[in-house]
Image (cartoon, rainbow, N blue to C red):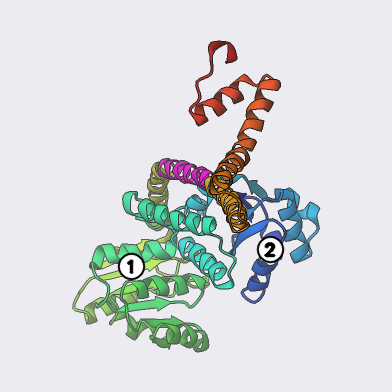
Amino acid sequence: MALIALGINHQTAPVALRERVAFDPETLPQALQQLHNREGCRGAVILSTCNRTEVYVQDEAEPQALLQWLADFHQVALNDLTEHTYQLNQLETIAHLMRVSSGLDSLILGEPQILGQVKQAYAQAKAVGTLSYRLERLFDRAFSVAKQVRTHTDIGASAVSVAYAAVNLAKHIFGELGKAKVLLVGAGETIELVAKHMRDQGVEAPVVANRTLNRAELLANEFGGRPITLHQLGDALGHADIVICSTASPMPIVGAGAVSRALKARRHRPMLLVDLAVPRDVEPEVGDLRDAYLYTVDDLQNIIADNMSSREKAAQQAEGMIAEHAELFSQWLQSQQSVSAIKQYRQQGAEVRDELVEKALQSLDNGLPAEQVVRELAYKLTNTLLHPTTKALQQAGSEQQSQRLSNLADSLGLALKNDER
């Protein structure tokens, strides 16, 4: 019974189709149970994010049947999915999960959030009771490999988004950011990401300036900050060590004059300004002011390009690690097949023994001579246990399967004569 995977992601399908096969938290337990209850399925895990939906199963069914199940569950035409999904065999599934967990298959190479999402998928399957022993071992190994990739490569060491790059730049200049006074200008998605990264670096109570106070309040409240309007920007600049801007204004809203006055009020303590907006939010002349350090989105894009190159080199190193671990795990799975066969073989032998011993005891109770009972027990036990092997040897010989005959003889410790090989 193999481990197989079926998936659809940002590389194979447009967002409109990915949305149609995404699993929401409310229906995911039902989907796991339904998938697990299919005939021949021993275990199931579903990973569903904004960029991918992947189904991992320990199953003896054909991958096409798994695709049909996905189409039926989401009421999507099978033809719509066929061209946009990938179906992976056991070794491919092992390596793929390790790559996904390590961030090598993400939209942004090396991003760390995916590992948390994979762990959540694992935990959900475990809670519902659809996590088989082999799937559990596979996911545990994938988590271990992802940790090794993070520890022993630079896959996640460099910033590859403008929001993270801006915060990383501030950290590089100021060191620890916990005591820095931060002013965020704007309240859109980019500034929200900046605020999240700032919070991760220990920043408390950022000031959020926005054209509408309502939106500034929503964002400031989320991060324990203070909301202000753009009219209050001049006063706020005088208290800010770090200013990060990203608005949709067609004209600059942070002028050189306002920054010059703020620097005087700060007694020329350094001020970092990062302008993530296009068109610019900060007048270019600010960069000419002493003690004002201005970086634009173009500056950060150059940093990001260098960092992406660094991550790609780290990814090559990580791919080698994953290939090695995938092969080792595949070998472990193959060894489990022999363990299962040995267990079944010994169980069959024990059942035959117990049945014949019970009959022998009944014969003794019926008054038959002990020697006769023992001899009969030995004969029947030997005959029953040797029958399948004898039959296999005869079949291999009669069908002239010399290699099979040789393998059987070697496994039984038999030495075939030259004319028998």
* Image: 139 above or below 127: above
Q: Tell me which residue sits at (40%, 77%) in the image.
A: 184
Measured as percent of width and height from the top left, residue 360 is found at 59, 52
Q: Which amino acid does label 2 sit on?
A: Leu
Q: Can residue 362 be seen in this view?
A: yes
Q: Main secondary structure of the magenta part?
A: helix
* Amino acid bearing label 1: Val
Instruction: Verify whether residue 179 appears in magenta.
Output: no
- Where residue 118 sits in the image (x, y, percent)? 51, 62
Q: How crowded is mark 2: few (under 14 residues within 10 Å), some or many (20 or more)?
A: many
Q: What element does badge 1 sit on? A: helix
Q: Report the disc number at residue 35.
A: 2
Dots 1 and 2: beta carbons under 8 Å?
no
Closer to us: mark 1 or mark 2? 2
From the top left corner, tell me how far across and down residue 6 is, in percent: 65, 53
Q: Name the residue under label 1.
A: 286
Q: Give the range drawn in magenta.
A: 320-340
